Image (cartoon, rainbow, N blue to C red):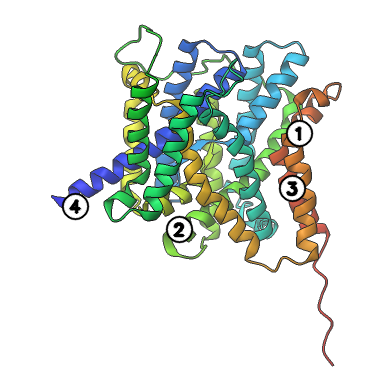
Amino acid sequence: MRKVTGTSLEVIQWFVFLLASSVAFPIVIGSIFDLSFQEISGLMQRTFFVVGITSFLQGMFGHRLPIMEGPAGLWISIFTVMAYTGSQAGNNSTETLQMLEGAMLWTGIFLLIFGVFKLAHRVLFVFTPLVTGAFLFLLTVQLSGTFLKGMLGIQQNVEAIHLPAAGVAFLTFFLVLGLSIFGKGSVKSYAVLLGVAIGWVIYAVVIGIHQPAVSVDTFSLPEWFAWGTPSFDWSVIPLAFITAVILLSNIVASVVAVSHSLYGKPTYTYSQLDRGSSFLGITHGFSALFSSVANVSLASSSGFINLTGQKKKRPFLYASFILIVISFFPPLVAFISGIPSPVANAALLATFVQLMGLGLGNLASEELNQRRLTILGVSFLIGIGIMFLPPEVFKGMPAIAQNLLSNGLLIGTVLVILLEQFWKEPHAPAED
């Protein structure tokens, strides 16, 4: 009986983590493209479905690790950039979203080719600990801004900090961290679940939960191509190819981080990475088909595992399947999406503390000599600097240049890879 109860709680906690990692991004996309509440609810339903089915497929047949497939930080930045470049080109939001569907399909095709023809593992020499650590560091830096805005209650047209919401969010953040570090037994294992539950209750009491009354069907299937038929614009192909290559580093970083959490050391096989690439290509197709943000293997899963100590794959698969089933019932989706954004973002930021630590650990695993420090300095200064630049500064450039050059995570990672490959380590002089 105790074993069944423990497994059930593990499933629930994985389920909460899947939800918390999914619920914020549809709100972000809705804000960027000025979607209505009904459109955001539909995007939320499709996101839950795609997250559930892609996580299950990767866990069962792809890399076969308990790694959540969730909306990619890299794709969030691409959506943001293309929203601006699309408006500059005179496209409306629907046309830009259709172009993004096409970009996700192109990226999926490249990833599938890398996996099927066993090319993914052949570029492993590129993803050194320096590159993997830099990618994780840049990813956490980029997404920390998104999560912090959510914690502070800065959404859509609201630009001022909402102090009550921020107070509850930071309480949730430190509660999750405190329970995971100082908690004992079950309290430590279910830190994320307890933190979200307590934060949600406090938010409801202090601020209140207000959701627009929208009529929804009791049961409905996620809509196909809700944004319309994909637009295959040739200008996005270079962006799709570079994104596919960067996402290979995402697979490596995620597998390395989670395997380190599970087994105490980073370990993987070539076939595991090739399968992961193949299924990442397939899951990009699912994301485009159901008009949602493309999913990738989230390295933050390692932070969740480290926080909770949960290392079994079966509860993860059960939670993924439950999320698929939940997505068929819009009233349940509406209720679950009622998790206050500040609380969800706070729980996610707490897991990213561990992810940042893993990134720094990768960087410190090799001697940080002058060469490596220079590579990191150049890449971080330019990559993070771009994250602070407003999109307007790239106005006047061709759309393809705007889409590439205004993405700090992409540019920073590419710089680390190029500098690491072309600036070779000097050989030690031979001894007499």
Q: Amino acid at mark 1?
A: Leu
Crowdedness of circle 2 by 10 Å Cα count: few (<14), some, many (20+)?
many
**Residue 65 - label:** none
- Residue under circle 2? 261
The mark lying in front, picked from 4 and 3, is: 3
* Residue at image coords 68%, 60%: 125
The mark lying in front, picked from 4 and 1, is: 4
Q: Position of residue 339 (x, y in %)?
A: 39, 26
* Residue at image coords 41%, 9%: 212
Marks 4 and 3, the one that precedes in the sequence = 4
The mark lying in front, picked from 1 and 3, is: 3
Q: Position of residue 400 (x, y in %)?
A: 79, 28
Q: Amino acid at mark 2?
A: Ser
- Residue under circle 4? 3
Marks 3 and 2, the one that precedes in the sequence = 2
Per the model, the C-alpha gap separating discs 4 and 3 is: 47 Å
Q: Secondary structure at mark 2?
A: helix
Q: Amino acid at mark 3?
A: Phe
Q: Does residue 113 lie above or below 213 as drawn?
A: below
**Residue 380 - label:** 3
Marks 1 and 2, the one that precedes in the sequence = 2
Q: Amino acid at mark 4?
A: Lys
Circle 1/circle 2 CB separation < 8 Å:
no
